[in-house]
Image (cartoon, rainbow, N blue to C red):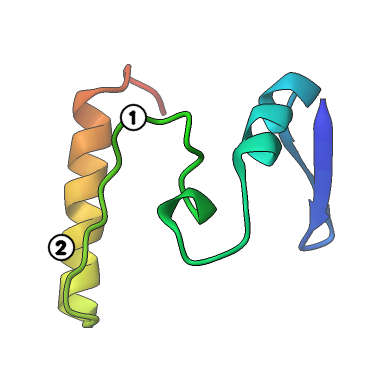
């Protein structure tokens, strides 16, 4: 398991194999593969106004989507 320190905590980020496919597909620059490894066939960029209301709507929408596709958890 690969761990990285951040905020004075060790965070698990995956196995060596899981990290390797991201590291091998990553490059510096201004292409989409900087943010999305090329192994993904599809991606989306969502832009919306940078206001408190917009962020609150965004957060509610994401939580609703995750709730629909996740098992019941506390």
Left or right: residue 17 versus residue 31 is right
**From mark 2 to mark 1, how far is it between C-alphas?**
28 Å
On the picture, is 57 further left or further right than 40? left
Q: Give neighbour class at mark 1: few <14, some 14-19, many 20+ (Cα, 10 Å).
A: few
Is 16 rendered above or below residue 4? above
Residue plotted at (69% across, 36% down): 24
Q: Position of residue 55 (x, y in %)?
A: 24, 69
Across and down, in percent, residue 70 comes to 31, 22
Q: Quadrant of residue 31?
A: bottom left
- Report the residue at 32% width, 17% height from top: 71
Q: Is residue 19 above or below residue 44?
A: above
Say how many tags the image has: 2
Residue closest to the far top: 71
Question: Where is mark 1, residue-wise?
Answer: 41
Residue at 56% x, 65% y is: 29
User: On the image, numbered disc 2 is attached to which residue?
Assistant: 57
Q: Residue at x 24, y 23 (%)?
A: 69
Label 2: few (<14), some (14–19) or many (≥20) C-alpha neighbours in 10 Å:
few
Q: Position of residue 59 (x, y in %)?
A: 26, 57
> In front here: 15 or 51?
15
User: Which of the two discs, 2 and 1, labels the residue nearer the N terminus?
Assistant: 1
Q: Nearer the viewer, residue 25 or 55?
A: 25
Residue 58 sits in which quadrant?
A: bottom left
Pick the residue in front: 64 or 35. Answer: 35
* Residue 32 occupies quadrant: bottom left
User: On screen, 50 above or below 3?
Assistant: below
Q: Are marks 2 and 1 in contact (CB under 8 Å)?
A: no
Q: Secondary structure at mark 1?
A: loop
Quarter of the image that includes the C terminus: top left
**Marks 2, 1: nearer the viewer:** 1
Q: Where residue 60 sits in the image (x, y, percent)?
A: 19, 53
Q: Secondary structure at mark 2?
A: helix
């Amino acid at each position: 398991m690969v761990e990285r320190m951040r905020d004075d905590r060790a965070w698990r980020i995956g196995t060596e194999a899981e990290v390797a496919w991201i590291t091998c597909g990553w490059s510096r620059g201004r292409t989409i593969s900087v943010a999305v490894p090329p192994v993904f066939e599809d991606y989306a960029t969502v832009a919306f106004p940078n206001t408190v209301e917009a962020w609150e709507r965004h957060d509610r929408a994401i939580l609703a989507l995750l709730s629909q596709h996740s098992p019941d958890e506390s």
